[in-house]
Image: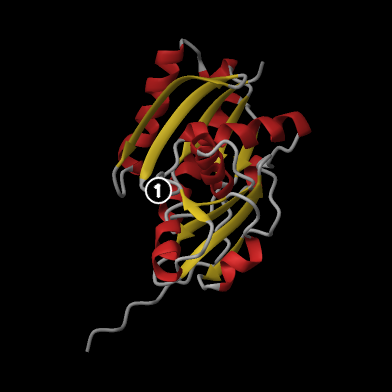
Amino acid sequence: MPKFILIESSGDVCSVAVSRGSQIIAEKSIQEPNSHSIYLAQFVDDVLKESGLEIATLDAVIIGGGPGSYTGLRIGCSLAKGLCFGSDLPLIACSTLAAFAASAQLEFPKAERFISLIDARRMDAYLGVFDKKLNSIADEQFITIDAQLAGDYTHGETIACGSGALKWVQEFNPKNILISSHTGINARNLLPEALKKWEAGELERVAYYEPNYIKSVFVTKAKPKV
C-alpha cells in the first residue's frame, strides 16, 4: 500500500495528512486566512511524528495543485518541492476542484453529478464538473457564474460544492440542486485522485512543476508618487 504525505493550501484551510493505502493515519488542519506560511511546515513535522513515519519512507508527496489562492498555492508548492528534492520522492498534483467533489461525495454518496465552484470574487469562479466516480467531465475553467450553468451540467441528483457554490445558489436559485455544507477542503480530500494518479503513474516533473492557476495572475505596478 502506498504511503503519502498530502498538503493542501489552496484556500483558507491549511491542512496536512499522512495516508497508508486508502486510510488517513494522521492529519492536522486549521481554517484561518493567510495561515499557510505560519503552520504548514510545522504540520508536516506533526503528522509525521503522529504517524510514526519518516519522510524518506513515504512513496510520494501529494499537493493540492489548484486552482485557488495564488499565495497559498505558491507556499504549498515550495514546501512540496522541498520535500521531494530532500528525500528523492515523486510529486503528484491533485485538482482542488476534484477534492471539493470528493468531500461532497462523503456527504451525498448517491449523487450523480458534482459541480465544484471555487470563489474568484465578484461573480467569477473556477469550475469543475465530476460524475459519481469523480471523473472530470468538463475542462476546469475560469467562468462568470450565470443561470445557464445549471442547464449545462445538471444531471440526476446534482450537488453544488466549493467556496463559490452558495453564491451561485443564492443568486440564481437553480432547480434540483443540493448544496454541500463544506466550504473548504482538507488534505484528506486529495487522496481519491492521488491514488488514481499513483496507479496510473501520473507523476509531475518536480523541477518544472507549477500550480494550476487557470487564470493568469496580473500584477499592477504601483503608481509613482507625485
Residue furthest to the bottom in view is 226
Query: What residue sits 41% from the left and 14% below the top?
Result: 49
The amino acid beneath tag 1 is: Thr
Horizontal relation, residue 138 to residue 177: left or right: right
Residue furthest to the right in view is 200
Q: State the residue in front, 48 or 143.
A: 143
What colouring method underlies this structural image?
A: secondary structure
The image position of residue 182, as x and y in percent, is 41, 44
Q: Secondary structure at mark 1?
A: loop
The image position of residue 89, as x and y in percent, is 63, 27
Q: Does 132 appear above or below 57?
A: below
Horizontal relation, residue 75 to residue 91: left or right: left
Q: Is residue 81 visible?
A: no
Q: State the residue in front, 187 or 157.
A: 157
Which quadrant: the C terminus?
bottom left
Q: State the residue in front, 191 or 116.
A: 116
Residue furthest to the top in view is 52
Residue pointed to by mark 1: 183
The image position of residue 165, as x and y in percent, is 45, 57
Query: What residue sits 31% from the left and 83% below the top?
Result: 223
The image position of residue 60, as x and y in percent, is 62, 27
Query: What residue sits 53% from the left and 73% below the top?
Result: 147
Quadrant for residue 35, please give it. Answer: top left
Q: How crowded is the residue under tag 1: few (<14 C-alpha within 10 Å), some, or many (20+)?
A: many
Q: Does 40 appear above or below 24?
A: below
- Report the label total: 1
Q: Does 42 appear above or below 112?
A: above
Which quadrant: the N terminus?
top right
Q: Is residue 139 visible?
A: yes
Q: State the residue in front, 211 or 146.
A: 146
